[in-house]
Amino acid sequence: MTADTPHMVAAHDQAETHRYTVHFPEHAPREHDPHYRAFEAYRRHTKDTAVCYVGERAGHDSCAGGLELHHAVLEFATANAADPAALHRDFPEIAEDATAEEIAHWLESSPGEFRWLCAFHHRGRGGAHTASHADWTAQLYVPGLIS
């Protein structure tokens, strides 16, 4: 280290707690979604060769539990309230004035919207539904970041 370089912070463990309220819009039960068949078809056609999205990047050492299919962009329960113009910015195939029905169809039939995750990286402590986005994304490239 030089005089111009600050001292390094030693490796350390740090507990994180995130608490907030999610305001889910009204939505039908999952099993009544008319587009669910497309989701299930994708699951059937890809499950035999599926691997955990996180594990294939940072190694499967932290993977635990069976594989589960995750919506990468929008969860089913949020589709009814999604702003089509906002979605259009990142997904030009969605019209800026798309209806909730058109968004739901895209959500359940677009292969880019799905990611296979092991239970730990889906719903566990290192999960897309549990860890902060910054931490979840970092674990793609930093093996063992979340335990």
Image (tube, grey):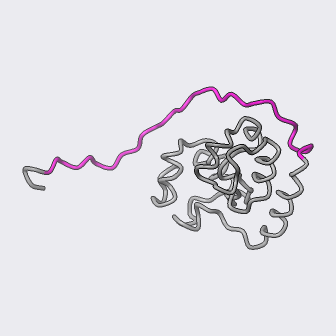
Residue 20: give x, y in percent of width and height. 59, 27
Residue that appears at 42% across and 40% down:
14
Residue that appears at 79% across and 47% down:
104
Residue that appears at 65% across and 29% down:
22
Q: Is residue 9 left or right of residue 87?
A: left
Q: Is residue 128 left or right of residue 147?
A: right
Residue 109: give x, y in percent of width and height. 79, 58
Q: Is residue 19 magenta?
A: yes
Residue 53: give x, y in percent of width and height. 62, 62
Q: Is residue 73 left or right of residue 99?
A: left
Residue toward you, 142 or 108: 108
Quadrant for residue 112, please give it: bottom right
Q: From the viewer's perspective, is residue 34 above or below residue 43? A: above
Residue 106: give x, y in percent of width and height. 76, 53
In magenta, the rendered stretch is 5-33
Q: Is residue 143 magenta?
A: no
Q: From the viewer's perspective, is residue 50 above or below residue 117? A: below
Q: From the viewer's perspective, is residue 101 above or below residue 140? A: above
Quadrant for residue 69, please give it: bottom right
Principal secondary structure, stretch drawn in magenta: loop
- Image quarter hosting the N terminus: bottom left
